[in-house]
Image: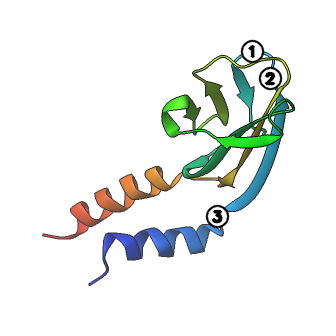
Amino acid sequence: MATQADIENIARTYLRDFPKFFQASFDVVGRTYELDHINIDSDSLWVAVYTSNSGAASVLAASQYSVDERNGILRLTGTYSSSTKVMVEGYYYEWVLPSDLEFYAKHAMEAHSH
């Protein structure tokens, strides 16, 4: 019998909706940034800030930013100087977020198993 993970993998394969890598960087101007991709996999996200003063990148903890996965928007919770650059790397999906696939796979299993 297929597991929920099997159903998710089969659906992802049929959709041909595999994760795609992206990188983005922004000069700090405000707190909100569009990542130019929707359906961001927040589990894969790497966010860092780079200041020319220190010459080193500092990786941000998940508590230092929030991500609107569905719309591809990053919002910083802290305040940074104008000499700071935000760097983001991660994966996105063209069609369906992993949480959406999980939701539908779970309901499919509930509907078809007794």
Q: Position of residue 62 (x, y in %)?
A: 51, 38
Query: Label 3 vs label 1: CA separation?
Result: 33 Å
Q: Residues within 10 Å of mark 2 (few under 14, many from 20)?
A: some
Residue visible at 30% across and 59% down? 106
Residue hosting label 1: 30
Circles 1, 2 touching at the beta carbon (< 8 Å) = yes
Q: Where on the picture, by quarter, is residue 113?
A: bottom left
How far apart marks 3 and 2 lie (CA) works out to 32 Å
Q: Please tell me which of labels 3 and 1 falls first in the chain.
A: 3
**Amino acid type at mark 3:** Asp
Q: Is residue 37 visible?
A: no
Location of the C terminus by quadrant is: bottom left
x and y, in percent, of residue 108 in the image: 32, 62
Give the mark toward the camera: 3 or 1: 1
Taking the image as shown, residue 60 lies to the left or right of residue 4, namely: right
Name the residue located 62 percent from the left edge and 46 percent from the top edge: 39
Q: Is residue 9 above or below residue 71?
A: below
Location of mark 2 (residue): 28
Near-viewer residue (68 or 77): 77
Marks 1 and 2 sit apart, C-alpha to C-alpha, by: 6 Å
Q: Which residue is mark 3?
A: 17
Q: Residue at x 69, y 21 (%)?
A: 32
